[in-house]
Image (cartoon, rainbow, N blue to C red):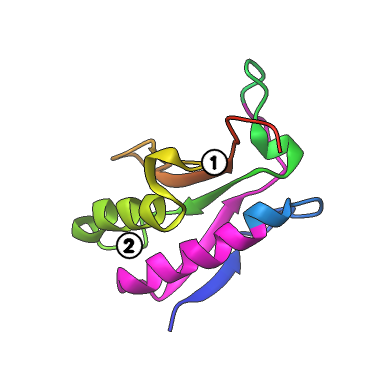
Amino acid sequence: MTHLFLKPGVRLHGLSPEMVMAVGVVVGAYEEAGAVECVVTVGMEGSHATSPPSRHYTGDALDFRLHNVDAGARENLVNAVKAHLGGEQSDFTVLWESKGTDNEHLHVQFSPSRPY
């Protein structure tokens, strides 16, 4: 069973309902990848891109630690999250950021292409 943890200092107040649902999908993908922990490393706190404005500030993005996942399983994990959140036509963007660095992480954001 994979357990969800928050890195100390992570702020989730104001997280969108879509991102709450996405967390469950991400935890499931970590479990499929054999990871014991799924760690949210960034929520609404911190400094992020301002142009375009970061979705972290609106509660529509989270970052998840990847270096605790076996290197050979990371690509499958990222692809599983993308697929489970709707694939290429999804309202979610899933990015494998800072690949190969100490800051390597999974970025998941709700970014609808059309208004609801």
**In x, y percent, where is residue 71?**
23, 56
Residue found at x 32% / y 62%: 69
Neighbourhood count class around disc 2 (C-alpha, 10 Å): few under 14, some 14–19, many 20 upward = some
What percent of the width, then of the height, locates residue 30?
39, 67
Q: In which quarter of the image is residue 103?
A: top left
Provide the residue designation for mark 2.
69
48 or 93: nearer the eye?
Answer: 93
Place of residue 32 in the rendered image (x, y in percent of width and height, measured from the top left)? 32, 72
Q: Considering only order in the chain, which callout, 1 or 2, is on the residue closer to the N terminus?
A: 2
The three-letter amino acid code for the residue at tag 2 is Val
Vertical order, 102 against 24 (above or below):
above
The residue type indicated by label 1 comes to Asp
Residue 38 is inside the magenta segment: yes
**Which residue of the protein is positioned furthest toward the top in this rendering?**
51
Which is nearer the eye, 18 or 103?
18
Question: Which stretch did the figure color magenta?
Answer: 20-48
User: Disc 2 on helix, strand or loop?
Assistant: loop
Instruction: Work out whether residue 30 can be spotted.
Output: yes
Disc 1 target residue: 91
Secondary structure at badge 1 equals loop
Image quarter (top left, top right, bottom left or bottom right) of the C terminus: top right
